[in-house]
């Protein structure tokens, strides 16, 4: 059987309609824009908060500007004539006052019975009453609304917007009854939910409610054929919810429920006012993460202006170009959400109308190569979902013990041009999922199940290498603290249970000057320390490279000393377990790399990578760290490898407004054998190839680029 359309490359455009955009809607002009943009799918408002067609349902919230228009019919007819798919956006995050008054029992409520309101979460000109995952409004009403669209129009799928809006504990009658039935107890009170154990129990239950809701909407869509697509809005793996809100949705849950994976990722990321919180390599990172979650589904990056905060004007152009080429280099598809209105010519700011066209053109021109692709990696970061859920907080750096660890680790991997992926960690991980990677990084992976621990033991015993930090494996998958590390004998340490605050005026004492972990570090007895340090004891055979020094206060200078710097507690340590090698840091080095990035932390972590990869990297290059290099495989049918370069070299501060070209870049890539074909997919200057056969039978291909302005890509058919 052939592939459904949503299993092929997706180049999407969403026209973000305001109520007034229904007036004189010009479907022909919209489709002309899609054709010029090389898009193959459009997402258009259908309804929920505001209906853009007559659903025929009781209580429909019809667009007040609607007369005799039939914009869905017009668009489906015009788009299908050009072989462009049409997805309808539904948004059942809430309803206005009149509908709520007619059906108050269809919505979410607080413990005292008062309704939950959107105004408590985001700014809005109107009061929106919120539903929950179990509510009639978000389920039966949404399901009937979806059926009414399919019955009237030959649309190709449904996009459920704002799926993550239901927040906090809901005390509606349905939730009370369902919790009583599922959990054999009453819903926790506002006071009880402050207990971490009660909180986790409720969060997991709510997670199941969210999954059940998703399946209800998906099954409704599939009533009209397996070729009809369903997906919904879920933010990326580095976007954790506020703990108080008890939001539970993440990309991992979508692997089975959605027909393709998509996540919003804006240059200025989800902030009010807009700010530049994410690094410019994030698009490639999130695309790779989606591909690792579900290797057979299309991965799509949703991008738009200013995180939705300043949605009427464009984001900085140069940053957008870097952002989009990053996603291309990882093999992702696109969802353009750049403007408000019918089409660019009918909106206020037309400057960004075609900023994504070069990327869409590139994907279209190389569709046969890039339709199916996966990242190639020598290193992997283990993404622990329980650690993220229990200890992550992307909105508050001081409280987070997951997100910023990930970002710091990625920063060094990117700058060293090391090819990496994220392993979606789970309690039933298998050895086969770990074996492809020469080194696996555990950035403070606090939560590990008994099975995960045994699998990692086996991985290292058979010759695998790991780099771990801080409290890795000190908690089980439910966040319960163990008496000691689950991976104690692998890491080569035991925990004392004491954590010292080493955020200020703290150092490490060098103990083993001959260790490869200290390569290039000379003329010093001390290194910087940071964050918090877990005091650990080394097991026999493990080698302490540096040790903990108690705080040395910096003021007054005359008193900035202590009598004894030497302690028995390792801060950095190497160990051998079976045939494998382990590097352990007793502080969260990922957070330190993100927040402080002192030379000592960078060099320690780079040396750990050199040790575990034995300096035998897939990519060797003279390109500066500001040039990001990514490699992906292009599927069994094409049996090829694409290597891309994205230039980040620019102005001193973000946002980047000007790129500086890099000249005479040499890149060596090691491949198993001679390519059958070498093809330049995109380059801004001549590219020269040279092939060298290695002693081990592999082949090194040297690429020399005379100049890199923004993006270049080459393809090798193997």
Image: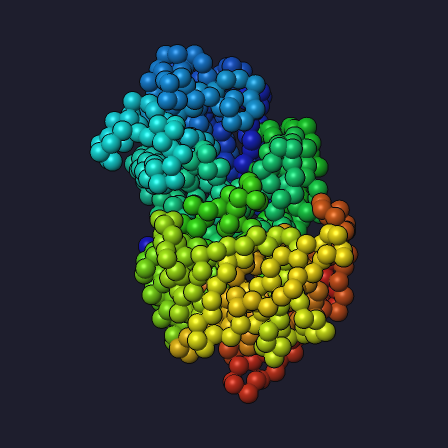
Q: Position of residue 38 (x, y in %)?
A: 58, 46
**Quadrant housing residue 224:** top left
Q: Nearer the viewer, residue 344 or 696?
A: 696
Color theme of the render? rainbow
- Residue at the farthest bottom position: 695
Describe residue 602's horizontal placement relative to residue 709 as left or right.
left
Q: Position of residue 299 (x, y in %)?
A: 48, 50
Q: Nearer the viewer, residue 510 or 656?
A: 510
Q: Is residue 115 visible?
A: yes
Q: Residue at the location (65% across, 64% down)?
A: 563
Q: Residue at the location (70% across, 74% down)?
A: 522
Q: Position of residue 451 (x, y in %)?
A: 32, 61
Question: How many marks do you count on the picture?
Answer: 0
Q: Residue at the location (39% across, 77% down)?
A: 578
Q: Nearer the viewer, residue 28 or 374?
A: 374
Q: Position of residue 279 (x, y in %)?
A: 62, 50
Q: Residue at the location (34% across, 20% down)?
A: 106
Query: Which quarter of the image is occupied by the N terminus?
Result: bottom left
Q: Is residue 528 visible?
A: no
Q: Is residue 139 above or below residue 611?
A: above
**Quadrant housing residue 246:** top left
Describe residue 538's horizontal placement relative to residue 693 as left or right.
left
């Amino acid at each position: 059987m052939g592939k459904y359309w949503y299993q092929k490359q997706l180049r999407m455009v969403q026209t973000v309609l305001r109520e007034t955009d229904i007036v004189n809607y010009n479907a022909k002009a919209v489709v002309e824009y899609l054709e010029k943009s090389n898009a193959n799918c459009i997402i258009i408002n259908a309804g929920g908060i505001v209906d853009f067609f007559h659903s025929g349902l009781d209580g429909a919230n019809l667009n007040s500007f609607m007369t005799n228009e039939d914009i869905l019919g017009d668009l489906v007819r015009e788009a299908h004539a050009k072989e462009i798919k049409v997805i309808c956006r539904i948004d059942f995050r809430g309803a206005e006052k009149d509908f709520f008054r007619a059906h108050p029992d269809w919505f979410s409520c607080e413990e005292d019975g008062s309704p939950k309101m959107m105004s408590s979460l985001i700014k809005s000109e109107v009061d929106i009453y919120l539903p929950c995952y179990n509510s009639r409004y978000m389920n039966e009403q949404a399901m009937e609304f979806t059926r009414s669209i399919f019955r009237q129009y030959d649309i190709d799928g449904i996009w459920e917007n704002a799926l993550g809006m239901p927040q906090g504990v809901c005390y509606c009658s349905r939730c009370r009854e369902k919790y009583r039935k599922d959990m054999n107890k009453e819903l926790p009170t506002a006071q009880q939910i402050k207990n971490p154990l009660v909180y986790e129990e409720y969060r997991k239950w709510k997670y199941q409610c969210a999954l059940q809701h998703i399946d209800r909407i998906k099954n409704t869509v599939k009533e009209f054929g397996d070729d009809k697509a369903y997906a919904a809005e879920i933010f990326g793996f580095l976007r954790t919810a506020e703990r108080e809100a008890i939001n539970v949705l993440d990309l991992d849950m979508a692997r089975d429920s959605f027909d393709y994976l998509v996540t919003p990722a804006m240059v200025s990321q989800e902030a009010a006012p807009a700010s530049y919180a994410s690094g410019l390599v994030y698009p490639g990172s999130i695309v790779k993460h989606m591909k690792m979650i579900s290797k057979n589904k299309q991965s799509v990056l949703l991008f738009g202006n200013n995180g939705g905060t300043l949605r009427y004007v464009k984001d900085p152009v140069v940053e957008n170009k870097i952002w989009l080429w990053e996603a291309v280099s990882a093999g992702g598809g696109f969802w353009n959400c750049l403007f408000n209105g019918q089409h660019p010519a009918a909106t206020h700011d037309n400057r960004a109308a075609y900023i994504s066209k070069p990327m869409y053109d590139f994907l279209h021109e190389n569709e046969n190569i890039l339709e199916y692709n996966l990242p190639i990696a020598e290193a992997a970061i283990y993404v622990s979902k329980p650690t993220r859920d229990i200890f992550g907080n992307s909105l508050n750096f001081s409280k987070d013990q997951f997100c910023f660890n990930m970002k710091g680790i990625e920063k060094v991997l990117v700058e060293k041009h090391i090819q990496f992926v994220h392993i979606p960690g789970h309690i039933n991980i298998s050895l086969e999922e770990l074996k492809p990677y020469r080194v696996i990084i555990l950035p403070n992976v606090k939560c590990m199940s008994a099975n995960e621990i045994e699998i990692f033991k086996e991985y290292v015993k058979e010759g695998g290498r790991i780099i771990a930090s801080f409290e890795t494996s000190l908690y089980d998958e439910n966040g319960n603290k163990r008496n000691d590390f689950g991976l104690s004998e692998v890491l080569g340490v035991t925990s004392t249970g004491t954590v010292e605050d080493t955020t200020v005026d703290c150092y490490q004492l060098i103990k083993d000057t001959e260790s490869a972990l200290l390569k290039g570090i000379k003329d010093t007895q001390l290194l910087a320390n940071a964050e918090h340090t877990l005091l650990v004891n080394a097991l026999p055979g493990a080698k302490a490279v540096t040790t903990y020094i108690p705080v040395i206060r910096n003021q007054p200078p005359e008193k900035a000393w202590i009598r004894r710097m030497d302690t028995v507690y390792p801060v950095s340590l190497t160990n051998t377990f079976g045939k494998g090698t382990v590097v352990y840091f007793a502080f969260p080095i990922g957070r330190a790399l993100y927040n402080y990035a002192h030379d000592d932390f960078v060099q320690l972590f780079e040396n750990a990578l050199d040790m575990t990869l034995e300096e035998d990297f897939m990519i060797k290059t003279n390109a500066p760290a500001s040039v990001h290099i990514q490699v992906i495989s292009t599927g069994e049918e094409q049996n090829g490898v694409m290597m891309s370069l994205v230039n980040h070299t620019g102005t001193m501060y973000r946002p980047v407004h000007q790129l500086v070209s890099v000249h005479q870049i040499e890149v060596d890539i090691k491949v198993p054998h001679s390519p059958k074909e070498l093809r330049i997919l995109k380059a801004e200057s001549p590219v020269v190839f040279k092939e060298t056969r290695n002693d081990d039978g592999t082949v090194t291909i040297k690429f020399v680029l005379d100049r890199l302005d923004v993006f270049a890509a080459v393809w090798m058919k193997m």
